[in-house]
Amino acid sequence: MPVQTDLLVLLEDQPGIVARVGRILGRAGINIEGLCGIARGGQGILHILLADDEAQGARDVLEADGIQVAEERDVWVLDCPDRPGELGRIMHQLAVAEINADLAYLTTGGRLVIGSPEFERVVATLG
């Protein structure tokens, strides 16, 4: 399914914090389909891609364990073959349509996740 859910999780930048998130979700039987994380200035941001039917459960178990879920939103997920220029080809379609993507990362299965404040236009352009 091309539309999935991305959770934006805010964390302290400390050893083991991503492991903690992984253990919490794993104990709840929730599969992480994609992940992107960065840390800066003592704070971490983690984007977690989930199947739509697992998003609320993931939010519930993370928040119950003191992990802050700052945002939940729909993202577009599409196949991104592993070859030179593929990312550029896909993102060029958005650029031509003058759509700004504010999130892009790859999943465990080599799919491309795209988030945008203009989500409906992303779907219309890439769908």
Image (cartoon, rainbow, N blue to C red):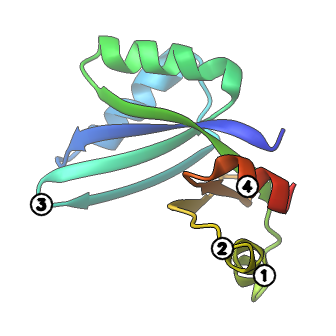
Indicate which label's residue lies in the foreground, 3 or 1: 1
Determine the image quadrant of residue 80.
bottom right
Q: Nearer the viewer, residue 90 or 24?
A: 90
Would residue 76 appear left or right of 74 to someone viewing this image?
Answer: right
- Pointer 2: residues within 10 angstroms few (<14), some, or many (20+)? few
Q: Is residue 22 above or below residue 110?
A: above
What residue is shown at x 73% (from left), y 55% (from top)?
Answer: 121
Name which residue lies at 78% across and 81% down.
Answer: 89
Would you place residue 114 above or below residue 74 in this image? Answer: below
> Which part of the image, by quadrant, shows the C terminus?
bottom right
**Quarter of image, res 106:** bottom right
Q: What amino acid is at disc 4?
A: Arg
Between discs 2 and 3, the one toward the N terminus: 3
Q: Residue at x 34, y 42 (%)?
A: 18
The 10 Å Cα crowd at callout 3, few under 14, some 14 to 19, many 20 or more, is: few
Q: Which mark is residue 98?
A: 2
Q: Nearer the viewer, mark 1 or mark 4?
A: 4
For marks 4 and 3 on the same chain, the one whose residue lies earlier in the sequence: 3
Q: What's the distance in space between the residues labelled 3 and 1, CA to CA?
A: 34 Å
Q: Secondary structure at mark 4?
A: helix
Residue 89: numbered disc: 1
Q: Mark 4 = which residue? A: 121
Image location (x, y in percent) of residue 37: 39, 54
User: Mark 3: which amino acid?
Assistant: Gly
Which comes sooner in the sequence, label 3 or label 1? 3
Q: Quadrant of the N terminus?
A: top right
* Amino acid at pointer 2: Glu
